[in-house]
Amino acid sequence: MSAATFQVTRAAPDAVQVSGALTFATAAQALAAINAAAAEGCRQVDLAGVSQSDSAGLACVLAVLADAVEHGRPLALRNVPEGMRVLASVCEVDTLLA
């Protein structure tokens, strides 16, 4: 069995693309990578390449958004996977992803 992998790639000077699994196994590393990109000027996070996510992946995305607000940095999510949107709705945090 292979370990879950993810990748955060700079798509443009102000955007990153997240791909692969955003799960318990990868959420802490993804959080650090996305927060570092945001600190360097990233203003958009594209989640179109996320192939798998769970509650830890959702928590990672919410933590990224919270960190951006805390530091006064605008940050927009793009292409949030349907499964993550459904989980956010069940957890009643879907408005935070808008």
Image: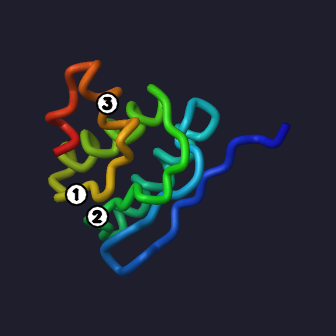
Q: Give the residue displayed 30% in from the left and 36% down from the top.
A: 85
- Looking at marks 1 and 2 on the same chain, the residue that comes earlier in the sequence is marked by 2
Q: Nearer the viewer, mark 3 or mark 2?
A: 3
Three-letter amino acid code at the position of disc 1: Ala
Three-letter amino acid code at the position of disc 2: Gln
Disc 1: which residue:
76
Across and down, in percent, residue 10 comes to: 46, 73
Q: Give the residue displayed 85% in from the left and 37% down from the top.
A: 1
Q: Which mark, by number, is residue 24?
A: none
Disc 3: which residue:
86
Q: Give the residue displayed 43% in from the left and 55% down from the top.
A: 34
Label 3: how many residues lie within 10 Å, few (<14), some (14-19) or many (20+)? Answer: few
Q: Secondary structure at mark 1?
A: strand
Across and down, in percent, residue 45 comes to: 34, 60
- Looking at marks 3 and 1 on the same chain, the residue that comes earlier in the sequence is marked by 1
Three-letter amino acid code at the position of disc 3: Val
Horizontal arrangement in the rendering, residue 45 relative to residue 9 (left or right): left
Gap between marks 3 and 1 measured at Cα = 19 Å
Q: Nearer the viewer, mark 3 or mark 1?
A: 3
Q: Quadrant of the C terminus?
A: top left
